[in-house]
Amino acid sequence: MLETVGLTAAEGDVYRLLIVTETASAEDIAGRSELSVPAARQLLLALEAKGLAYEVEDGTGWFAAVSPEDALVPRLQRRRDDLEQTRAAVFDLVETYRRSARTPGAGEAVEIVRGAAALRQRLRQLQDGTRREMLWFCKAGYVAMPPESNQEQFAAHARGVLYRTLYEQAYFDDPNAVDNVVKGVLVGEVARAVPQLPLRMAIADRSVAVLPLNSSGAPGNPRDLRAAVVRRSSLLEALIALFEHYWEVGAPLRVTEEGRIGGAGPTDPAAPVAEDRHLLSLMVAGMTDEAIAGQLRVSKRTVQRRIQGLMSLAGVATRMQLGWHAARRNWL
């Protein structure tokens, strides 16, 4: 805790012991701690060199602590002054960067990030700085950060950050997609699925958004990637509203105790059995029949037959109607 004023953790512990005991020798310090006598003597000498302790009488080996008010408060004030100067320099650099990176005519609300590596770094920094909520549009594939490499999400969950994530149907064509979603939901992510998303996007604390600008199907060099960082503005408000619109129509994705995408259990006595509820959850998530068959380890024909049976049970004519019916009847 005292590292900020130039003490190591061990020096801080010995300094605290000195304050409590008023005077102490290396032997006393060793007896009150897990330190050896030579290590305690070295730390006492280090405190003396830093002006936090003094030898009571020359050559006796007994030390006393210098008052924290005299030894540490001035250091703390100097640190505070240094920090304020550093803060001013950092914000000056931020403003200089924004002026140089800004797209002509885009205005102060939009900054352009160039290259996949820069976008990946910005996404990591965005999550590291989030304190309340992250909103995500997850399209199929990725342009800068593979989903399995996003360890920042787990660190953010540990801080209490809420993740609300929307996945589009094509996202689940990746055989690892379901596992990635399950891992996120198990640590607190709230996930929903929609047939298609208009863009990729991440929004942190409703104060800044990051979205790639390149066409979704445009290949090319990762260095050619362009992304917009959008700060508080009417444009950011529109992006948040876009997210909330898709969120309202998204189908919830939950995870069962067995670690599969599924529901919390039906309240309808006429609801389908657990296996069919699992199939329904995968279907509502937008997975293709082939992908569902792979997850359930059955044939595509079996998947189609079971879906037809569920449509008959629900009394509907289309899969979309089946999805709405399942959500309304708490079958998912």
Image (cartoon, rainbow, N blue to C red):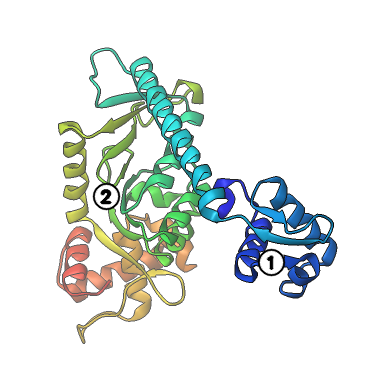
- SS at badge 1: strand
**Residue indicated by mark 2:** 195
Q: Which image quarter: residue 137?
A: top left
Task: Look at the image and tell me in which quarter the C terminus lies.
Answer: bottom left
The amino acid on which the numbered mark 2 sits, given as a three-letter code, is: Pro
Q: Which mark is residue 77?
A: none
> Is residue 230 in sight in this rendering?
yes
In front of the other: 26 or 298: 26
Q: Residue at horizontal 19%, vertical 60%?
A: 318
Task: Look at the image and tell me in which quarter the N terminus lies.
Answer: bottom right
Give neighbour class at mark 1: few <14, some 14-19, many 20+ (Cα, 10 Å). some
Q: Residue 101, relative to residue 84: is it above or below?
A: above
Residue lying at the far front in this picture: please name it: 57
Q: Residue 23, relative to residue 199: is it above or below?
A: below
**Residue indicated by mark 1:** 23
Q: Position of residue 77 (x, y in %)?
A: 46, 41
> Is residue 165 in sight in this rendering?
no
- Marked residue nearer the N-terminal end (2 or 1): 1
Q: Residue 59, relative to residue 311: is it above or below?
A: above
Give neighbour class at mark 2: few <14, some 14-19, many 20+ (Cα, 10 Å). some
Q: Residue at horizontal 29%, vertical 38%?
A: 208
Q: Nearer the viewer, mark 2 or mark 1?
A: 1
* Label 2, label 1: how far apart the Cα atoms are: 73 Å
Q: Is residue 16 left or right of residue 121?
A: right
The amino acid on which the numbered mark 1 sits, given as a three-letter code, is: Thr
Q: Is residue 164 left or right of residue 260?
A: left
